[in-house]
Amino acid sequence: MPDARAIESQVGHPETKWNALKDRIQADAVEQFVDVRGDWLDLMWTLDAYRRGGVPPDGMGRQETPPGTRLNAIYRGKGNWFSDIIALLLGNQTAQLLGPRSRVFGILSSSPDRHRLAC
């Protein structure tokens, strides 16, 4: 089983890539996901490499947590990262302050068909 440093030497560190992606979106005022999809996929593939290796990236997560549990928690956090990206992209399209949320009132209907927009 490879260690985290060996994986990092091959694919990089996800936290470094994550911070660079956020910085790029803000510094370049990126508004469209298509403009960062390559960076996003690279970040996801980087996380996948750690998952395949069975080790968490150095310095990520609660260090007192067992490595397997920590890796799983980091991997599950991908959805939160995606919502952060969408909030940053939308924030570049408006003067309003936006933040990521798991549910936004009024966007999805409360009907059984939850995939329909409530417009």
Image: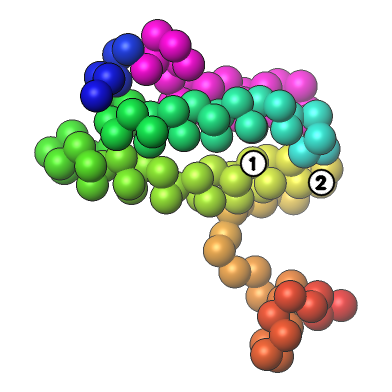
For image coordinates 25% across by 19% down, the residue present is 3
In the foreground, 109 or 55: 55
Q: Quadrant of residue 60?
A: top left
The residue lying furthest to the bottom in this view is 111
Residue drawn 43% across and 20% down? 13
Query: From the viewer's perspective, is 112 left or right of 74?
Result: right
Measuring from the top left, give residue 110's x and y in whole percent: 67, 87
* Image coordinates for residue 38, horizontal then vertical, percent: 71, 27
Q: Are marks 1 and 2 in contact (CB under 8 Å)?
A: no
Asked whether 25 falls inside the magenta stretch, the response is: yes
Quick check: 105 left or right of 7? right
Seen as rendered, the residue at the extreme front is: 1
Q: Is residue 19 visible?
A: no
Left or right? Give the position of 114 relative to 83: right
The answer to whether residue 109 is magenta is: no
In the figure, residue 43 lies in which quadrant?
A: top right
Looking at the rendered image, the quarter that the C terminus falls into is bottom right
Asked if residue 99 is positioned above or below residue 20 in the image, the reply reads below
Residue 71: x, y in percent?
30, 40
Residue 68 placement, left or right of 84: left
- Residue 35, percent across and down? 80, 29
Amino acid under disc 2: Thr
For the residue marked with disc 1, what is the amino acid? Answer: Ile
Instruction: Provide the residue designation for mark 2.
Output: 94
Which residues lie in the magenta part?
Answer: 7-31
| Circle 1 SS class | helix
**What label does residue 85 carry, if any?**
1
**Which circle's residue, 1 or 2, is located before the other in the chain?**
1
Residue 109 visible somewhere in the drawing: yes
